[in-house]
Amino acid sequence: MRKFLIVFTLFIAIGAVGGAIMMWVDPSGNGWGGAPMLDLLRAKMPWPDVFFKNFIPSGFVLLAVNGLTQLLAALMLIKKHPLAYWAVLACGVILMLWIVLEWWVWGFNPISNLYFVFGLIEVIAAITR
């Protein structure tokens, strides 16, 4: 289970880092189809003129909330830290909450649905290890 979770958390971390980089390289979202999502964020989230002029702040939040936390959990698993499974549990809950927010903003979509399942897998794996 530990080896599976190391690979799984690294996979999610790499995806979050890649998503953040994508947001920083093309903060308008035009090149990767994110511009309509930015309009929805502006309509539904607080302080749209501060945080949602472009995707740069969202990239930092994605990196911090899902990239670095998943990476930390992977490192804790690698080092066999006694709280590693608690970290994985927290990452799974955080990921599911992130996806619930995405559903509220954009509605259901295949990628978000899949990542919700990833978070659920982390929670179940951490609990049943």
Image (cartoon, rainbow, N blue to C red):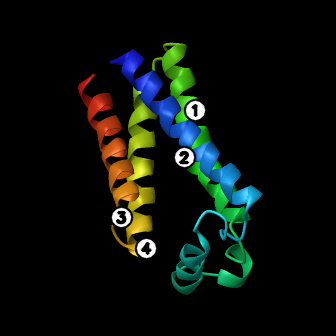
| Residue at image mark 4 | 106
Q: Position of residue 84 (x, y in %)?
A: 46, 24
- Are the residues at dot 4 and dot 3 in contact (C-beta closer than 8 Å)? yes
Ranked by sequence position, the earlier of labels 2 and 1 is 2
Name the foreground residue: 82 vs 36.
Answer: 36
- Residue 50, x across and y down, in percent: 73, 78
Q: Amino acid at mark 4?
A: Trp
Task: Estimate the x, y position of residue 17 in percent, counting from the top left.
Answer: 63, 43
Label 2: which residue? Answer: 66
Quick one: label 1 or label 4, which is nearer the N terminus? Answer: 1
Local SS, label 1: helix
Q: Which residue is mark 3?
A: 109
Q: Residue at x 30, y 38 (%)?
A: 121
In the image, taking residue 99 as reference, residue 61 lies left or right, namely: right
Mark 1–mark 4 CB contact (< 8 Å): no
The secondary element bearing badge 2 is classed as: helix
Residue farthest toward the front in the current orientation of the protein: 31
- For numbered disc 3, what is the local secondary structure? loop
Residue 53 against residue 56 in the figure, above or below: below
Nearer-N-terminus badge (4/2): 2
In the rendering, at what x and y percent does residue 1 appear? 32, 18
Query: What amino acid is found at the position of numbered circle 1 in the picture?
Result: Leu
Residue that mark 1 sits on: 71
